[in-house]
Amino acid sequence: MQSKKQSLIETSLQVLTDLALNITVAAPLAYFFHNVKTDVISELIIIMTIINFVKSYFVRRLGNYGDELKKRICQKFKKTMRSIKSKNYRYTGYHEGTLE
């Protein structure tokens, strides 16, 4: 599980690489193929960078929360299995429709 600081660093690196890719590839393509003005391109890049950063950070934190939730569920399941074993239940093999 990552700390908030680690999530922030990872998200920042991802957004910076996306920004570099947008500036070097997407912006020239939009300018040459669709005649989009450079000021419009720069505004779009800024807006999408902010949106991408916020989205990536919250998705990363949500993923960490999911890992913690999964860990809690596994611990509860293990505790339940230990209590079943301690009560000495036995599996008889008889379930509805399996033995005649």
Image: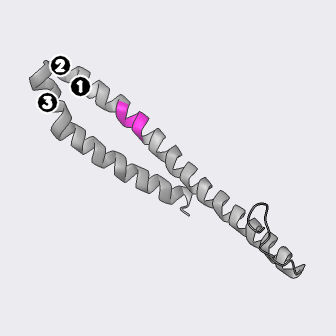
Which residue is at 37% across, 29% downward?
47
Q: Please report the bounds of the magenta region as a residue range.
A: 48-52
Q: At which x and y percent is residue 43? A: 30, 25
- Residue 84 relative to residue 43: left or right: right
Look at the image and tell me in which quarter the C terminus lies. Answer: bottom right
Crowd rating for badge 1 (residues with CA inside 10 Å; few <14, some 14–19, many 20+) = some
Q: Secondary structure at mark 1?
A: helix
Q: Is residue 97 left or right of residue 68?
A: right
Residue highlighted by disc 2: 36
Mark 2 residue element: loop
- Examine the residues drawn in magenta and state their main secondary structure: helix
Q: Nearer the viewer, residue 77 or 59?
A: 77
Give the residue number, with chain letter if any, for mark 1: 41
Q: Is residue 97 above or below residue 92?
A: above
- Which amino acid type corresponds to the residue marked 2 in the rendered image? Val
At x 17%, y 19%, the residue is 36
In the rendering, which numbered label is found on residue 29?
A: 3
Judged from the image, the secondary structure of the residue bearing numbered disc 3 is: helix
Task: Compare residues 69 and 12 and report the one nearer the observer.
Answer: 69
